[in-house]
Image (tube, rainbow, N blue to C red):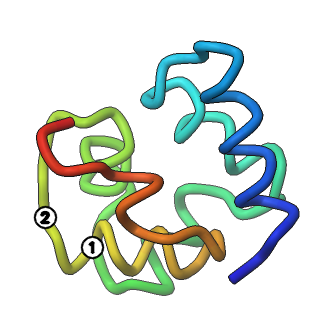
Amino acid sequence: MNTKNHSAVIQLKLLDFPLPNIRKSLHKLTGISQPDMAQSVNTSRQNITHIIDGRRQTPKLQKAIADIYGIPVDELFPKGD
C-alpha cells in the first residue's frame, strides 16, 4: 500500500471532496495516466474512465486500479458507491 496516496485520499474525504473527484485526481498525484493504467490492466482507456467516474462497477478492474494506486479497494471504491 502506498501510504502517501492513501493518506491523501483520506484527507480529501475528510474535507468532503466527492470520491469520484478524488479518483479522477489520483493520476495527477501519482503521475499514472489513464492510458498507461488501461494498458497495464489490459483494458481500454474508456473502460478505466467509466470505472473511475463510477459509471461502471467491475470489481476485478476496481481492485487492479486500487492496487496500482496503492490504496485499499474498499477505500477507493466503497460498496454502494
Q: Secondary structure at mark 1?
A: helix
- Label disc, if present, on residue 52 of the rendered structure: none
Which image quarter: residue 32? bottom right
Q: Is residue 16 above or below residue 48?
A: above
Looking at numbered disc 1 in the image, what kind of residue is underneath it? Leu
Label pair 1/2, CB-CB below 8 angstroms: yes
The residue carrying mark 2 is 58
Q: Secondary structure at mark 2?
A: loop
Whole-percent x and y of residue 62?
A: 30, 66
The residue carrying mark 1 is 61
What residue is at 50 percent from the left and 86 percent from the top?
Answer: 40
- Considering every residue shown, the one lying at the far top of the view is 16
What residue is at 59 percent from the left and 13 percent from the top?
Answer: 16
Whole-percent x and y of residue 23?
A: 53, 41
Whole-percent x and y of residue 21?
A: 54, 24
Whole-percent x and y of residue 80?
A: 12, 40
Which image quarter: residue 71? bottom right
Looking at numbered disc 2 in the image, what kind of residue is underneath it? Thr
Q: Nearer the viewer, residue 29 or 9?
A: 9
Q: Nearer the viewer, residue 37 or 15?
A: 15
